[in-house]
Image: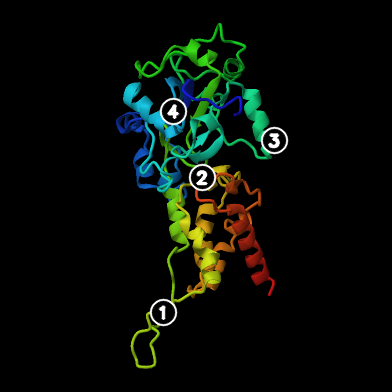
Amino acid sequence: MSENTIHGTTVTIRVHRFTPKSDSEHARRHSSSPFGGRARGGSPFGSSPSRRRIRGRHFTQDYTIETRAGQTVLDCLLAIKRDLDPTLAFRYSCGHGICGSDAVSINGTPTLLCTAKVEEYAKSNSIQSRQANTADEGFRSTATLASDVAGNGTTANSSAVSSDRYARSLTGLDADNQQNTSDADHPSATTESHSALSNPHVIEIAPLPGFPVLHDLIVDIDQMMNQIKKLEPYLKADGKLATTEDGKIDMFEYLQNPEELKRYELLSNCISCGVCEGSCPVYAGGEAFIGPAALIAASRFINDSRDEATNQRLDAIATADGIAACQSVRACSRECPRGIDVGEEMWQLTERVKSRQGR
């Protein structure tokens, strides 16, 4: 059992929160602008509504709770919402890693709340150890630190702190002076700061990188779903019904052998959770890229022997913001909850598009 494994002890859940401005507040601020009404209808030269930055207040908040063996991070958030702070917003559904609705970033790693065990993610309260773990794996951190949002409307009563004091509090250098009080808007949410700073077990939770944040840990996934739909993720057959010798419909017209089934079977398990996209430094970094989730959906039908639109599908992804934008970092394969080697599939698509273009 590692030194970071915990069973039945105190853990600090550090949540990166976001409170959006109300529509009435936003309207009051922009009511004097002669261009305010035009922006509401959407500009053909601007970003789509799903990608538009939502204004609001960013802050971090600590919750200190007791955990038990085998508990998931989702269990912790549910306990916080039930007993400490009913205003905490996050998304979940099945709770068993099937629906993919609860994807977030935990300690800088995109994953699902319901599959993340507390004992696996409760690390020592040290920013140096977290950076060392990231460096050892060869991937850059995609976490949003409190230092990134300290200047975005954080109040003195919030648990968000400046970059220097945040680092000092994590390393224990400022434990005697740092006061990490509960947010003024949520008086029942957080326990005293001393317990959070002295507690060596911290789990840091942030919204999934690469997606606009709607409220706390809830992000807008419309962009990802629209990209998947753009590549038409459904079977395209020739439309001809096969018949038997006596003229009856052949019920086995789409019969496949095991090898043909194996080519796409695992890909059909994709749950569009967005973990691969949050892990991708290209997509999460804001570059023009259709994203690994959409490409996996396309690959599922490109590898299906029953599909008759392979050439059209390869043409659709052979664009500058398609498979060509993939940098083969393979970070997308790290935490796929369905066990898909997303990076390998991206490489296979790249080779297939290149070989087709070279003919």
Q: Earlier in the sequence, mark 4 or mark 1?
A: 4
Is 244 placed above or below 111 here?
below
Residue drawn 56% across the image and 24% down it: 147
- Secondary structure beneath dot 4 equals strand
Give the spatial CA distance, label 2 vs label 3. Answer: 21 Å
Kind of residue at disc 1? Phe
Where residue 172 sits: x, y (%)? 60, 14
> In what quadrant of the picture does the C terminus appear?
bottom right
Q: Nearer the viewer, residue 200 or 345?
A: 200
Q: Nearer the viewer, residue 123 or 301?
A: 123
Q: Residues within 10 Å of mark 1 (few under 14, many from 20)?
A: few
- On residue 136, the disc is 3
- On residue 225, the disc is none
Residue drawn 42% across the image and 48% down it: 98
Q: Residues within 10 Å of mark 3 (few under 14, many from 20)?
A: few
Judged by depth in the image, the label closer to the viewer, 1 or 2, is 1
Quadrant location of residue 141?
top right
Residue pointed to by mark 2: 275
- On residue 252, the disc is 1
Is 148 placed above or below 245 here?
above
Residue pointed to by mark 4: 17
Q: Earlier in the sequence, mark 1 or mark 3?
A: 3
Q: Earlier in the sequence, mark 4 or mark 3?
A: 4
Q: Cβ–Cβ below 8 Å for labels 1 and 3?
A: no
Kind of residue at disc 2? Val
